[in-house]
Image (cartoon, rainbow, N blue to C red):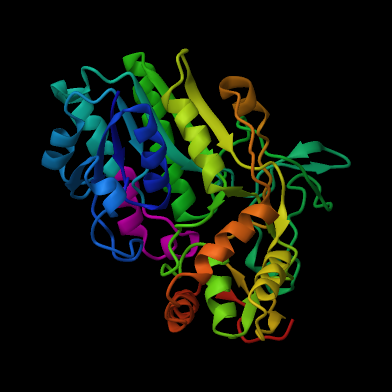
Amino acid sequence: MKILITGGAGFIGQKLIRELLKYGDEIRILDNFNEQIHAYSDLPDDIANKVTLYKASVLDKTAVASALSEVECLVHLAAETGTGQSMYEIEKYFNVNVQGTAVLLDVLQNTNCGINLKSIIVASSRAIYGEGAYTCQRHNTVFPDQRTRINLSNRLFDPICPLCGDPLQLTPTSENAPFKPMSVYGLTKQVQEQAILMYARTRGINGFALRYQNVFGPGQSLKNPYTGILAVFSNLARQNENIEVYEDGDESRDFVYIDDVVDATVLAIKYSGSYVGALNVGSGKATSVMSVAKEIVSFFDSTSSIAISGAFRIGDIRHNIADISEIERVLGFKPKTDFKDGLGFFLEWAASQPEQNKAAYGKSVMELVEKGLMGNVGDNA
């Protein structure tokens, strides 16, 4: 199979390529090697000689047309990522995530490049759900609105029922939850995935929007201060720097290990049936941010202190658990690596990597403060 992977030089892309090469597939990569994301400006040796690389932006229509020629499967991973940064780098996020996707689809629709295309897979995100699903004692399943700055400033961090204002209980979010993105990043991923699925339906080909939860594992960027609390916390812990945990530390995420994400993506690529739709890719379990910080400090035997600051970022959600029953039904996917094991694999790898500039994370936080996108900064929890 001839497969083009946009953003293929990134964290997920490289792992995916190594797996697809086992099938004998012909792999092409389109990637611009964004310095914020990539540690290097070229592919590692074990991949470089086995793939065709187009070093270009997804916005470059000429390069996109060349890369797409005669492709049978398109895996669209290229995107700007990071909830906080998206709230002020608005034009950049729309350009890459939305306009970049539009360029891909325009080339496919209006040239012969898409004549052999049988399947298209896009890396979507749990961010499109916003807070996602909760249960209310009076109103059953509800989908709360974005938490207000007033409540967050008063350390009322948990979402409330949008109908009665009562407390809520977290429940897994399924694919039929309404779109309620609470960041520019989430909004662009919503548009991106819906454009891809619309195109797939129009052309009568397979289309998968894989709604990745919080992906982690060896190989993820340790230098990008805008994404990945595991990378941020591990970098601080290795340098015995204090770790600040936002809100009250009880906020949680569905962390899914990279190998499981690759397995799910390969299952979508190799799917022999007919399908157009969205599927959650997660572990189906929630892990609190405070427990993550404690595990990391313990692993490195660090002297870092962990401070619950009460600070908050506009655009962040409170909790997240994915309902993964649909992807099991459609693709037979089941996650194999639990969070504790995966965290150990990640930290062992991170310990072997060069320490990153600890000031970079502080700079990213100050950018949010200056843009008015953080609250309770400098307060005591």
Quarter of the picture containing the N terminus is top left
* 368 relative to 324, above or below: below
In the displayed structure, 29 sits above or below 206; it is below
Taking 67 as reference, is 82 above or below it? below
Say whether residue 82 is magenta.
yes
Residue 248, position as x, y percentages in the image: 74, 71
What quarter of the picture does the C terminus occupy? bottom right
Q: What residue is rendered at 62% in x and 30% in y?
A: 176
In percent of width and height, residue 83 lies at: 49, 59
Q: Position of residue 373 (x, y in %)?
A: 51, 71
In percent of width and height, residue 356 lies at 43, 77
Please tell me which residue lies in front, 187 or 210.
Answer: 210
Residue most toward the left?
62
Residue nearest the observer in this picture, 256 or 275: 256
The residue that appears at 80% across and 41% down in the rendered structure is 135
**Residue at 37% in and 54% down:** 80
* Residues rendered magenta in the picture: 80-99
Residue 317, quarter of picture: bottom right
Q: Number of marks in the image? A: 0
Frontmost residue, 376 versus 70: 70
Residue at left 30%, top 49%? 46
The reply, left or right, for residue 229 in relation to residue 4 is: right
Q: Is residue 208 visible?
A: yes
On whether residue 277 falls in the magenta region, the answer is no
Query: Eyeballing the image, is 16 above or below 237?
Result: above
> Would you say 73 lies left or right of 217 here?
left
